[in-house]
Amino acid sequence: MFGVQPRAARARTKLGAVLAAVTVGAGMVAALTLGASQASAATYVNGMDVSGHQGNVAWSTAWANGARFAYVKATEGTSYKNPYFAQQYNGSYNVGMIRGAYHFALPNNSGGATQADYFVNNGGGWSGDGRTLPPALDIEYNPYGATCFGLSRASMISWIKAFSDRVHYRTNKYPMIYTTLDWWTTCTGNTSAFAATNPFWIARYSSTPPTPPAGSATWTMWQYSDSGIYPGDQNYFNGAYTQLQALATNPH
């Protein structure tokens, strides 16, 4: 059944493709020291993302340690729903975090619009309340088979567009796109087709900020490690807290 592979395992797949030579120990050191090394160069907001693999999360502890936003896995394909979604999505909100939901794409399973509807119907909604991040599409290395899910670059771009347009139709918000530059280049040809509409959340396990996809001036979120002081993956928002609030408020 889709959805049984924990996000940590998928994170190792991403890490292997992006930074094969980096050891887990080095990644943990980077996660713990990145805040200090980057603070003088840019303004970031600390956050995290979790899935069913993390189970019930101690949100008050994560908040006390400085996390101000969280993305929570809601769905995968059209048959999997995170059994801990309510505890994670509502719990992060209740301690004061700005939170959002994400969908793990299986483009070889069904159409983009079909998966978008499944996502929105099972936690992937949005409201401009200043506390809800854009719905997010997790589109990356296939943990179950061919890297690009057997789709050509043109077909992959069409699938992502169908998902994005359907989410926008349902929520009035274009989804955040989570990916790695390596996967995006391999499977879409580093298309710039979404640069004008969709914010990008880039995975790069390094102390060096990621390069955004073609056409995008910058990245919006950066997943820099799969371990650290927060449960799940460690993330930065690229900007001040007021800008994070704007992302959760303004139509897009």
Image (spheres, rainbow, N blue to C red):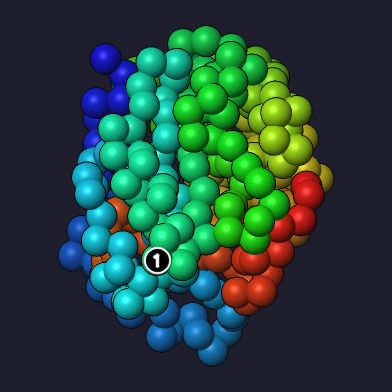
Instruction: Say which residue appears at 36% left-offset and 71% top-offset.
Output: 63
Q: Amino acid at mark 1?
A: Val
Instruction: Say which residue appears at 58% left-offset and 41% top-offset.
Output: 135
Residue that mark 1 sits on = 95
Q: Relative to 77, is 84 above or below? A: below
Crowding at label 1, few (<14), some or many (≥20) Cα neighbours within 10 Å? some
In this rendering, would 175 be left or right of 169? left
Element at label 1: loop
Quarter location, residue 211: bottom right
Residues 125 and 243: in front is: 125
Instruction: Say which residue appears at 30% left-offset and 68% top-offset.
Output: 60
Q: Is residue 162 visible?
A: yes
State the residue lying farthest toward the left. Answer: 25
Give the image location of residue 107, x and y in percent: 51, 18
Give the image location of residue 44, x and y in percent: 54, 74
Give the image location of residue 226, x and y in percent: 30, 55
State the residue lying farthest toward the bottom. Answer: 40
Quarter location, residue 86: top left
Residues 182 and 234: in front is: 234
Q: Is residue 219 visible?
A: no
In this rendering, would 51 be left or right of 122? left
State the residue lying farthest toward the front. Answer: 94
